[in-house]
């Protein structure tokens, strides 16, 4: 009985820790897509799929690279990213600042099975493609990365330069 109680307590604490991280930008996937998120990030906001300025295709490979690795967009531009996984393993593309991506990467190491879904990220199974629509509201340098443990560390990161409109 004590072992069962200890096991259940450990499970509850692990879930609570995962959920506390969920409040910091990690939400469990939902089956239904609600209205556009109004959450403003330093690197922008979810874009309206009906108001896309341009489409950029990004390929991901098991060589732990994105192609292209560097992108330039204009401040205020809404981009539809079409993300193609050319590899044989799961990859993802997550937008953010370098600091945010490093923090998120560390969290992924601690909770590797955690599923989450935000408008600035997409997971793409081998041989498949995904999409993300994002409006870049601030100028500066931002990044995209695959934060599956080991991928970011192997160099799976790209840069987005947002120029003043």
Image (cartoon, grey):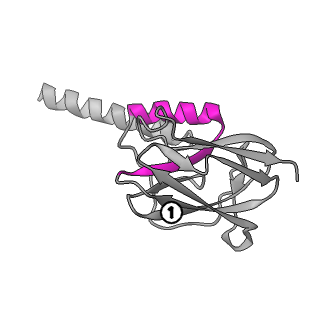
Q: Residue at x 47, y 30 (%)?
A: 106
Residue that mark 1 sits on: 130
Number of other residues with Cα within 10 Å of mark 1, as a class: few under 14, some 14 to 19, many 20 or more: some
Helix or strand or loop: what does disc 1 sit on? Answer: strand
User: Where is the N terminus found, in terms of image quarters?
Assistant: top left
Q: Percent x, y for residue 22?
A: 49, 42
Q: Is residue 90 placed above or below 154 in the rendered structure?
A: below
Q: Percent x, y for residue 104?
A: 52, 36
Judge whether residue 116 can be spotted in this image: no
Can residue 37 be found in the magenta stretch?
Answer: no
Q: Residue at x 75, y 50 (%)?
A: 72
Q: Residue at x 78, y 47 (%)?
A: 162
Residue extending farthest to the left is 1
User: How many tags in the picture?
Assistant: 1
Residue closer to the observer: 4 or 14: 14
Q: Percent x, y for residue 82?
A: 57, 63
| Left or right of 164 in this view: 136 | left
Can residue 103 be found in the magenta stretch?
Answer: yes
| Left or right of 45 in this view: 74 | right
| Residue extent of the magenta highlight | 89-110
Q: Percent x, y for residue 19?
A: 45, 40
Q: Is residue 155 placed above or below 6 in the rendered structure?
A: below
Q: Residue at x 82, y 52 (%)?
A: 75
Q: Quadrant of residue 100?
A: top right
């Amino acid at each position: 009985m004590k072992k069962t109680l200890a096991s259940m307590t450990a499970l509850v604490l692990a879930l609570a820790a995962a959920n506390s991280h969920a409040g910091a930008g990690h939400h469990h996937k939902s089956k239904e897509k609600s209205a556009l998120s109004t959450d403003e990030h330093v690197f922008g906001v979810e874009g309206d799929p009906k108001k896309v300025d341009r489409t950029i295709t990004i390929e991901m490979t098991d060589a732990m690279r994105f192609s292209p690795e560097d992108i330039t967009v204009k401040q205020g531009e809404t981009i539809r990213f079409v993300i193609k996984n050319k590899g044989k393993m799961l990859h993802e593309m997550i937008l953010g600042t370098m600091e945010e991506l490093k923090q998120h990467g560390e969290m992924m190491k601690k909770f590797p099975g955690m599923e989450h879904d935000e408008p600035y990220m997409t997971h793409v199974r081998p041989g498949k493609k995904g999409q993300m629509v994002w409006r870049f509201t601030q100028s500066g340098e931002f990044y995209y990365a695959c934060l599956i443990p080991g991928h970011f560390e192997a160099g799976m990161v790209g840069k987005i330069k947002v120029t003043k409109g």
